[in-house]
Amino acid sequence: MESISKLRTLCQKPKVSDREDIGMSYQDMLSKYRLGLSIYLTWVFIRFGISANTVTIFSGIAAIIGGVCLGFNNIWIVLIGILFLEIYYLLDFCDGEIARYHKECSITGWFLDWYMLFVRDAAMFTGLAVGAYSVQSNLFVLLCGFLAVLTPILDKSIIGCGWTIISWQRLVEKQDGQLLKLQKYVVDINNQEKLSIDHK
């Protein structure tokens, strides 16, 4: 098993380099703290053979527990909720680190990682809305809570749709229109199979 410093080179450096190339930064204190801590959790997950997708699911469960705790009118339970949301963020770092360690990348992994953002936002804002409503029960708080839950979900849906369209268009351009030709070929094949079935 590699050392922690070796794991940092294998699992963290590629992500930081790639994302800083497009203008993101991992130099703030919070990112440094999460990168510093997540690698130890990653070491444990790799050591016990836990997959990146499993860790992604764990992160969603942590986010849901955190969101539920935020709905209570008790400071200690709310603090536990904040702790679980922080665990979500650490696990969100870990799943990518495990995938980079194993040099694995899958559509399922990308989907789960993206989907857990929806789970986190829905859980966190629902918890906050329930907590706010339990303190101040009126229509305005209820409306604000509804919008707080809905807005991040719509925001990520729009971003997701945008990236899907951009990716599709780039794929078509890369293949010089071959993707469109392939779609036409599949339609033609399906039509021919239907005709042959009808004649039998």
Image: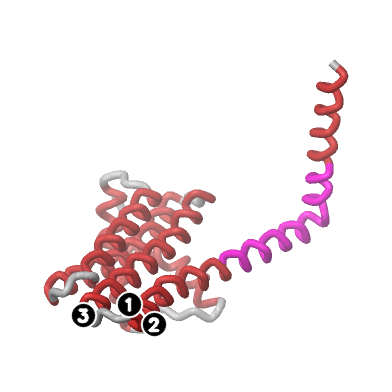
Q: Which residues are magenta?
A: 160-184
Residue found at x 54% / y 50%: 107
- Name the quadrant containing residue 32: bottom left
The reply to whether the magenta stretch includes residue 172 is yes
**2 vs 3, front mark:** 3
Q: Earlier in the sequence, mark 3 or mark 1?
A: 1
Find numbered disc 3 in the image and state the secondary structure of the residue it sits on: helix
Q: Earlier in the sequence, mark 1 or mark 2?
A: 2
Q: Is residue 20 left or right of residue 184?
A: left
Q: Position of residue 25 (x, y in %)?
A: 45, 80
Q: Position of residue 87 (x, y in %)?
A: 26, 65
Residue neighbourhood size for the residue with mark 1, other residues' Cα within 10 Å, grouped as few (<14), some (14–19), many (≥20): few
- Name the residue beneath numbered marker 3: 135
Q: Position of residue 199 (x, y in %)?
A: 87, 19
Q: Position of residue 38 (x, y in %)?
A: 29, 65
Residue neighbourhood size for the residue with mark 3, other residues' Cα within 10 Å, grouped as few (<14), some (14–19), many (≥20): few
- Proximity of marks 3 and 1: CB atoms separated by less than 8 Å: no
Q: Earlier in the sequence, mark 2 or mark 3?
A: 2
Find numbered disc 1 in the image and state the secondary structure of the residue it sits on: helix
Q: What's under tag 2, amino acid-wise?
A: Gln
Q: Which mark is residue 27?
A: 2
Q: Is residue 118 left or right of residue 184?
A: left
Q: What's under tag 3, amino acid-wise?
A: Val
How many marks are shown on the rendered structure? 3
Q: Which mark is residue 32?
A: 1
**3 vs 1, front mark:** 3
Residue found at x 50% / y 56%: 110
Residue farthest top in this picture = 200
Residue found at x 45% / y 54%: 112
Residue found at x 31% / y 66%: 90
